[in-house]
Structures are given as C-alpha cells and as structure tokens.
Amino acid sequence: MLLTGERSLDSAPFDEISFDLCSHRRDVIIMSADLSKYTQIVRVKEELPDQHLDVGMAEQNLISVAAGISKAGFVPVATTFACYATRRAYDQMIICMGTSPRTNIVIGFMPGIANPARIHHQAAEDLGMVRAIPNATVIDPMDVTDFKQALDAAVDIPGLTYIRGHRGATPRILDPDRFHFELGKTYQLRQGSGVGIITTGLASQWGLESSDLLEQRGTSHSLLHVPTIKPVNEDEIAEFCFAHEQIVTIENHQIVTGLGSLVSEIVSSIGGGPRITRLGLPNSWAPGGTLGYIRGQLGLDADSLAKTIEGVLQ
C-alpha cells in the first residue's frame, strides 16, 4: 500500500527538502527572485549561504542566471511562483535552459488554483507550456513525499526540469518507505473496475477525496496517480485506460494541454478505447479566493467530482 495510514502536515516542506538536498549535494544552488520568504527558503539561506542566490525581483533574470550557473558546473534550482516562472520567463526557459544539455531545475510554487489571487497569479497553463518544450521534463508531485523524491531525482536529469512545488501546510499522503519516485512511472492508488480515474499533482489529493466518497456509495473505480507529465510511460497509461470503459482525468490545470490532453493523445494514437472525460479548469477564468471556494465554484470539490464520476457510468 503506497498511502500512509495517518496523514500528517508539513508546515514548510521545501525549507527542509532544500536544506537536506544542499547538505549532501554541494553543487546545488537554490535560487530565488526576492521570494525566498514566500517559497519558504530559510535554512539554506541562513545556514548554507554559499548555496543560496537571490537575483532580486526579476524572474527573467532568474532563469538566465540559473542557466549560466549550470554552465559553470553547478546545479541551479530556480524557485518562484509558477505564474512567473512560466508566463513571465518562458522565452528564457526555452532558449537558456531548454536548448542546454546542462541540468537546470525550475520549481513553480502555488500553481493553478492553489493561488488565492485571480488569473494574474493562477498558473493554469504551466504544465502544457513546459510540456511543449522539446526534451523538457515536467513533474507535478501530489504531496511532500512525491515532491522530495522528484527533486532528488531531478538533480541528475540532463536538460530542463520543471516541477510544481508545495508550500505551507502540505499533507504527507504517500508512505516514504513504500513509495519510490521514478521518472515517467505511474502509481495506482486505488484498484477496482468501473470507471478509471487518472490524476496528477494536487488533484491527486482531490481524487482520493472523491474516491473515499465513491467507496462509501459503492461505486467501483480505480485511481491512477501520474506525477510525471513528460516523459511518461505511455504503456502504463494505455494499459490502465483500456482496462476501463470510462476514464475521468482530474487536474489542477486547464483541461487543454495538460494531463487530460496527454491521456487523450495516448489513447487516440492506439485507436478505439474508452471515452475520456477531462475535469480541471474549464475554458473560463477561475475566481479568486480560498482553495475550497474555488474548487466549489469549478465543480472540483470532492462531492461534485464524485457526482460527475458517477454520472459518466449512467
């Protein structure tokens, strides 16, 4: 069983994750664009100052400098909000990092509707944007365990790696003694027949919430967590999809270009297969507010998701 028995909360996960990484990898440089406080980089900044670099409030410069540092033999981990990393510095990410064989890591915090602000801070298209960059690696972890192991793997991956980050009170759902992140691998969290649910990132937490309701209501289903958006094990996704007549994808992202699009592309390239219902941010702007409020407005709360999933079986 990959899930923990009792879920705990980590108050500032990246602070410990980054410090642990830098403590045993002296070539790693944690970078920020005047957001160290808000991405919760404290220990590295105070205790390992030679492995911390703040370039000021300039995200395009952040990415360019990080790429330069990689050419000097270091492993940069550039951190900022997801909306700034992708929208504001996309050209630098493509040209400076995307064309380089050197290891370059970008972590985008508060992605999608995890940000309480409105559209100017909601990175609802970041996975699709980076997925379009040739040879890029794109990872959307679901919890603290996933996040730490993904970053530990990323420091040894050539080229550009984009990871969605977790900050604040972040749950530990996956058992670190049983879960082992592998690039491209998928993980089945619930097994059953009926509808197949495929999730990634924060939406894998939402999928588990709706799965609990479906179990209570006697609705058979399976749940597959896909942390790697690119490159992904297409055979594993295809095998899961073709074992079900209906597939529902759930993501904290636009339903265009993200997980739902990825699954649809894999199934359509084979031909036939199940009907795919994509759930996530629809073709409209999300409101601002608490995560619970926004989820309710978009039909992404646990009860709405469970009802939608039950509906595809009728």
Image: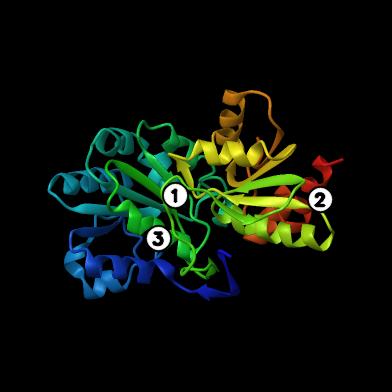
Give left or right: position of 108 versus 224. left
Say if 284 sits above or below 166 in the image: above
Q: Amino acid at mark 1?
A: Ala
Q: Is residue 289 visible?
A: no
Give left or right: position of 193 versus 5. right
Q: State the residue in front, 310 or 293.
A: 310
Q: Which residue is mark 3?
A: 149
Q: Amino acid at mark 3?
A: Gln
At horizontal 21% and vertical 71% (from top left) the residue drawn is 48
Q: Residue 71: give x, y in percent of width and height.
A: 15, 44
- Indicate which disc, 1 or 2, sits on the residue closer to the N terminus: 1
State how far apart marks 1 and 2 are (Cα): 30 Å
Q: State the residue in front, 76 or 117.
A: 76
Give left or right: position of 227 versus 113. left
Q: Which residue is mark 2?
A: 307
Q: Residue 284: give x, y in percent of width and height.
A: 65, 38
The image quadrant that residue 94 belongs to is top left
Q: Residue 37: give x, y in percent of width and height.
A: 37, 67
Q: Which residue is mark 1?
A: 82
Q: Residues within 10 Å of mark 2 (few under 14, many from 20)?
A: some
Q: Nearer the viewer, mark 3 or mark 1?
A: 3
Q: Residues within 10 Å of mark 1 (few under 14, many from 20)?
A: many
At horizontal 68% and vertical 40% (from top left) the residue drawn is 243
Say if 185 sits above or below 34 in the image: above
The extreme left residue here reads 72
Q: Residue 252: give x, y in percent of width and height.
A: 58, 48
- Indicate which disc, 2 or 3, sits on the residue closer to the N terminus: 3
- Indicate which disc, 3 or 1, sits on the residue closer to the N terminus: 1
Determine the secondary structure under disc 1: helix
Determine the secondary structure under disc 3: helix
Query: Pointer 1 and pointer 2: residues touching (CB < 8 Å)?
Result: no
